[in-house]
Image (cartoon, grey):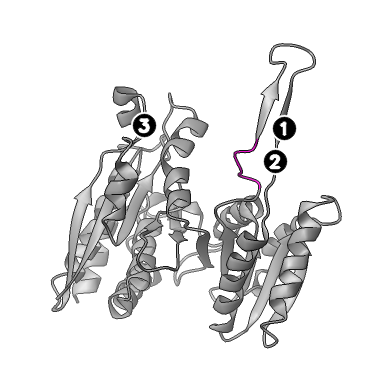
Amino acid sequence: MTTHRIAVIPGDGIGLEVTPAGIRCLEALAKRPGLNFDFTEFPYSCEYYAKHGQMMPDDALHQFREHDAILLGAVGFPGVPDHVSLWGLLLPIRREFQQYVNLRPVRLLRGLTSALRDRGPEDINYLVVRENNEGEYSDIGGRIYDGLPEAMAIQATVITKKGSERILDYAFRTAQSRSRKKLAYATKSNGIKHSMPFWDEQVEAIAERYPDIHVEQYHIDILAANFVTHPDWFDVVVGTNLFGDILSDLGPATAGGIGVAPSANINPDPSIPSMFEPVHGSAPDIAGQNIANPIAMIWTVVMMLEDLGEQAAADDLMGALENVTGEGRVLTRDLGGTATTTEFTDRLLAELKG
């Protein structure tokens, strides 16, 4: 029997409500022969910060390293600045474990309605591959003259040859595995003088290794517009950290909302744990009401199963999820229904069992 060791960090806000939904799905799958999960829950969160003055203890990354995967609910809550919560928990995990791939599927599930007129599931089905360790989210920069008229802040964008090559190679290989074999990449080399032309050069160099992939360049502003006007154009889209972050929120907004958006922070080396988290964040405005949409977390669990090599279980869970959305009877409020988080999860588990 295969036992996968999962580090579970429910975190903050609705993370405390959707994470149990994901765990329930894994427990249901573990009733099948040959599959088992060993969960270790960690209380690291903004509440932990309020008590201890740090988002997680100094040895937390060592604790996570002993696991096969990390399942994260959400990070952030009022009272703790976002730069404290993110740089204290989420970003150290991504960087310590070199989870340089942030993979975010954008797909309109059966039964859900797009915000775009006359668009169905056949029109919205692509992947956003985001560079996850460098780019615009570097820690290089600073502030001077605070409180004076001369106050200024400088933030450096860091794009390296190594970082570009590895994320682009992943994106091209992903495009190669899909039937359309198309890759679009985001840039802004017509306005950003140094980093973006360098990024473009790396794309061109990697593209030579993949002559079977059709490559298209888009400046980020028109790319964002085309996500709305022509979502059917896209198959695999790759971008730097900031551009990928923005696009992978915009995409789900056209496909049922941020409550259905999953993501994975991946290090392709299987000896190092990858981390899986829904895109929606902690949503403190609805926390504690049992109305959060668990689809993003459940789809995130599907991605984790795929990464762990449990494709059959992943397919079964995704199939059950789409059957439930397809029938349209039990949906949460953000999707036009009345179901609670628990009620939606109960319906999904009944479908999975059936």
10 Å neighbourhood of mark 2: few (<14), some, or many (≥20)?
A: some
Q: Which residues are magenta?
A: 136-140
* Residue type for callout 2: Ala
Q: Secondary structure at mark 1?
A: strand
Q: Secondary structure at mark 3?
A: helix
Q: Is residue 137 magenta?
A: yes
Give the mark toward the camera: 1 or 3: 1
* Residue type for callout 1: Ile
Q: Secondary structure at mark 2?
A: loop
Mark 2, residue position = 156
The CA span between labels 3 and 2 is: 28 Å
Is 335 situated left or right of 221 in this image?
A: left
Q: Earlier in the sequence, mark 3 or mark 2?
A: 3
Mark 3, residue position = 46
Circle number at residue 154: 1
- For this orientation, the residue located farthest to the top is 148
